[in-house]
Amino acid sequence: MATTNLRSEMRDKDRGGRDDRMDKDGDDRKGRGGFHRKKVCRFCSDSDFVLDYKDVRMMQSFVTEHGKIVPRRISGNCALHQRQLTTAVKRARNIALVGYVSMGA
């Protein structure tokens, strides 16, 4: 029985078994990921951070360069503030404070 186990180990080693494989980054980490910090809604945590459609600089941080609104799983907003943000971005687009697309597109 020990010889069978030894043979299977040798066969896996010769064929590049699972133990020898590395992931895409080139490191040999076991498992999928590392530590993920929970995203916190900026608007809930800081009462001074007010959601206003006239604040162009704040709106640009929630819009990609292609003009898409950043989803809440990326931005970390809560559902209530993500809905308010979407409305504010649409209002800012309507009065041409924020573009529908970037300049180069």
Image (tube, grey):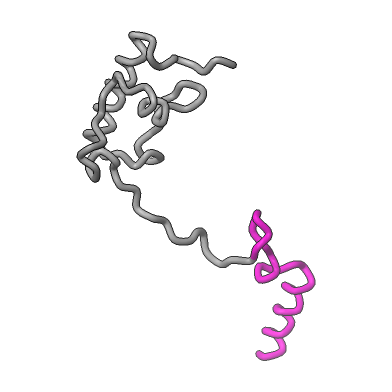
Q: Please determine whether, in this image, residue 20 is positioned above or below residue 76.
A: below
Residue projecting furthest to the bottom: 2
Disc count in the image?
0
Front one among 33 and 44: 44
Q: On the rendered image, what quadrant is the C terminus found in?
A: top right
Residue 41 shows up from this direction: yes
**Residue 93: percent from the left, percent from the top?**
37, 13
Residue projecting furthest to the right: 14
**Residue 82: percent from the left, percent from the top?**
28, 32
Residue found 30% across the figure and 19% down from its top:
54
**Residue 42: percent from the left, percent from the top?**
29, 41
Q: On the rendered image, what quadrant is the N terminus found in?
A: bottom right
The answer to whether 38 appears left or right of 4 in the picture is: left
Front one among 104 and 69: 104
Magenta residues span 1-27
Q: Is residue 23 magenta?
A: yes
Residue projecting furthest to the top: 95
Front one among 27 and 90: 90
Front one among 3 and 80: 80
Residue projecting furthest to the front: 48
